[in-house]
Image (spheres, helix red, strand yellow):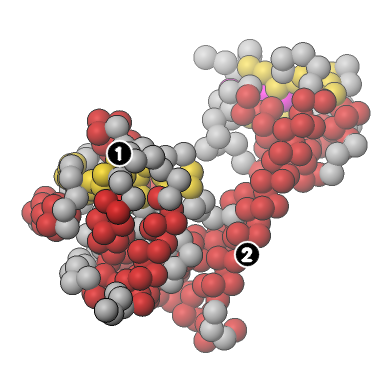
Amino acid sequence: MTGPPPAVARVRVAVRRALSGLAAGDLVLVACSGGADSLALAGATAFVAPRLGLRAGGVTVDHGLQEGSAERAEDVAAVLRGLGLDPVERIAVAVGTEGGPEGAARTARYAALERAADTHRATVVLLGHTRDDQAETVLLRLARGSGARSLAGMAARSGRYLRPLLDLDRRTVHAAAALMDLRAWADPHNADPAYTRSRVRHDALPALERVLGPGIAEALARTAGLLRDDADALDAWAEEAEERARRGPAALDVAELAGLPRAVRSRVLRRAALAAGCPAGALTARHVFELDRLVTDWRGQAHVDLPGVRRGRRSDGRIVVSADEEGGP
Ligand SMILES: Nc1ncnc2c1ncn2[C@@H]1O[C@H](COP(=O)(O)OP(=O)(O)OP(=O)(O)O)[C@@H](O)[C@H]1O
């Protein structure tokens, strides 16, 4: 008896590994765009899930951004049903404008996936990101000047989302889709140079490979894994340090903070700002740097303005982040 071709076997093994901790009867939902990655994921999940006593369904989101997108989403849903996934849902969303076209589509997509997972009581939602997607993410963030947490890239598991294919290269995953006879739809956005990610995928990474040699994607993904460990350790340290430095609900002891390495101290200050109500999306490294100066470069500066109409100040040997009464609504 011959087994499946190696590419199909590798995708199935990856999915089996990701699903191995689930309980019999749990529902797994595959988020499928109709691209080769998530089709291969759907095909492998349809094969693996029943063998683990799990139920498997699928969701495809129609962003309504291109002509014929509704029909295309229906085609994807039909393929998922053909694989034996049940339930299968096609969800049409309205994409706003906030955060640029890619960001707005992502926000609408994840909201739809959340709703579908709640409606069907799915235990996990599977996403088809590969090692190459991880490398692109890391390179983009590196170019923006990010810290360890951000360079750690996407997690194999975050909340109810799993990324079973994160250690597999795109070529293998695409080969698996073709071998499973799953015909992918090539999203024109993926090749559109107007999109930053597309330029990273088609221009930047190939250029790096030409100059530095092959294996760049693998190396960037490895860096992400190493930095994830570092960031986890530093976050845990910061949590403990914050406990020790806390003096009252929104005050941190300057002497305790001053004794910490900057990597830990800046995390403690960031946590304090978030706890005081600064919106995570608006709180930048610059804000945290200015808060840090209240500790390490104190010259009697008045206060630091923070997003969410908050301010940080130093008084009585403490750093306090609180609502900005004067600038408040
Ligand atoms: N329209 C969609 N409906 C459902 N899930 C989606 C949709 N778009 C993306 N996803 C999920 O998010 C993952 C990452 O999507 P993204 O567009 O970043 O990558 P991609 O390289 O285009 O992936 P794919 O080849 O699977 O489309 C997909 O693999 C899929 O699991």
Q: Is mark 1 within 8 Å of ligand 1?
A: no
In this rendering, the answer to whether 283 lies above or below 188 is: above
Q: Which residues are magenta?
A: 309-313
In this rendering, the answer to whether 223 lies above or below 303 is: below
Along the line of sight, which residue is nearer the eye, 149 or 254?
A: 149
Image side of residue 23 versus residue 67, left or right:
right
Give the residue number, with chain letter if any, for mark 1.
25
The residue tagged with tag 1: helix, strand or loop?
A: loop
Image side of residue 118 versus residue 321, left or right:
left
State which quadrant residue 15 falls in.
Answer: bottom left
State which quadrant residue 308 falls in.
Answer: top right
Distance Cα–Cα, label 2 vs label 1: 37 Å
Q: Residues within 10 Å of mark 2 (few under 14, many from 20)?
A: some
Residue 197 visible (yes or no): no
What x and y, as percent, mark residue 179?
Answer: 24, 75
Q: Amino acid at mark 2?
A: Thr
Give the residue number, with chain letter if any, for mark 2.
223
What residue lies at 30% left-to-right and 46% top-to-bottom? 53
The residue tagged with tag 2: helix, strand or loop?
A: helix
Mark 2–mark 1 CB contact (< 8 Å): no
Main SS of residues in magenta: strand
Q: Amino acid at mark 1?
A: Gly
Q: Is mark 2 within 8 Å of ligand 1?
A: no
What residue lies at 52% left-to-right and 72% top-to-bottom? 217
The answer to whether residue 262 is magenta is: no
What x and y, as percent, mark residue 239?
Answer: 72, 33
Image side of residue 83 versus residue 199, left or right:
left
Image side of residue 74 versus residue 235, left or right:
left
